[in-house]
Image: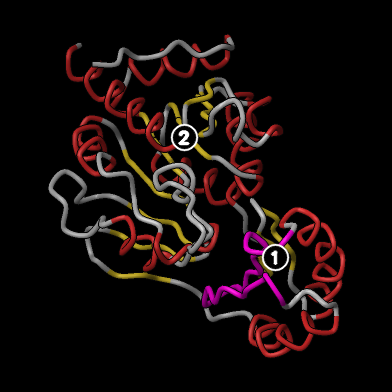
Amino acid sequence: MDSLPSPLTQAGRDGLDAILGRPRGAVVVLDFDGTLAPIVADPEQARAHPDALSALSVLAPEIASVAVLTGRPAGVAVRHGGFAGVSGLEHLVVLGHYGTERWDAATGKVSAPAPHPGVAAVRAELPGFLERFGAWQGTWIEEKGRAVAVHTRRATDPQAAFEALREPLADLATRHGLIVEPGRLVLELRPPGMDKGVALEEYVREIGATSVLYAGDDLGDLPAFAAVEKLRQQGIPGLLVCSGNSTEAVTELAERADLVVDGPAGVVRLLQALGRTIISR
């Protein structure tokens, strides 16, 4: 049985102490892919870690709220996570498309604004665009409803393909009023105005949280890290967790984290230990 790890930073230790000292005021917010679910070559095959639901169902009733904050559509994250109808997760919230969409377990419904017209325009243009840049072979397009993503993981040289497409896709996105969100060998074209930092801060304010834990694994999680750092300055302690071992962790995230755990399995062990510790007090 794993014990609760000690954060490497004083700010992280303060955040953990605040969560343990007043759990009913704590919010735990988690990324999905790479954090609750292992990264796989085909995102449609991604599923939450086998022990994630049991860990969350023990922890959630003991704290103010648990939320999943993901770049995926909220409904897709709910299906791949298996979050619907789970005992103990009756008040779980999934914030999809970086917070643009919201699924509440209490109602089972997704709420969202009208889609950005630029997404449809980019979707229609992308196949020919990739062909013109000689990037069709080995890359593939993921339809995300309110966004479109180009993956290079299957290319002969995935990182070279990623770098070669980064600027052209940014130009394409700008032309249609979108932005590019880079990730692990994926470039997502999506509407501006919302990111994980904005979504996290809004949710913490909504709940009236007195402390927050955020766990993520990729570049898209940096705004959420920045939001937690901002909340700390405003008197709301926070714990930043990077999901990824020493060879796989995104450097920028690992350097800012209070705690680095070994991928989704490490996140689950952390959640289990946190739940046990709160219950035992």
> Could you tell me residue 91's position as x and y percent?
24, 50
Alpha-carbon span between mark 2 and mark 1: 29 Å
In the depicted structure, whether residue 39 falls above or below residue 78? above
Front position in the image: 222 or 164: 164
* Quadrant of the rendering where the C terminus is positioned: top left
Q: First in sequence: mark 2 or mark 1?
A: 1
On residue 260, the disc is none
Disc 2, SS: helix
Residue type, numbered disc 2? Gly
Q: Which residue sits furthest front?
A: 156
In the depicted structure, whether residue 160 falls above or below residue 230? below
Front position in the image: 22 or 93: 93
**Residue drawn where x is 77% and y is 79% of the image:** 130
Front position in the image: 245 or 214: 245
On residue 192, the disc is 1
> Could you tell me residue 37's position as x and y percent?
40, 48
**Residue drawn where x is 53% and y is 33% of the image:** 244
Label 2 Cα crowd, 10 Å radius (few <14 / some 14-19 / many 20+): many
In the depicted structure, whether residue 120 falls above or below residue 200? below
Residue type, numbered disc 1? Pro
Q: Which residue is mark 2?
A: 263
- Residue 213 shown in magenta: no
| Magenta highlight range | 137-156
Q: Which residue sits furthest left?
A: 87
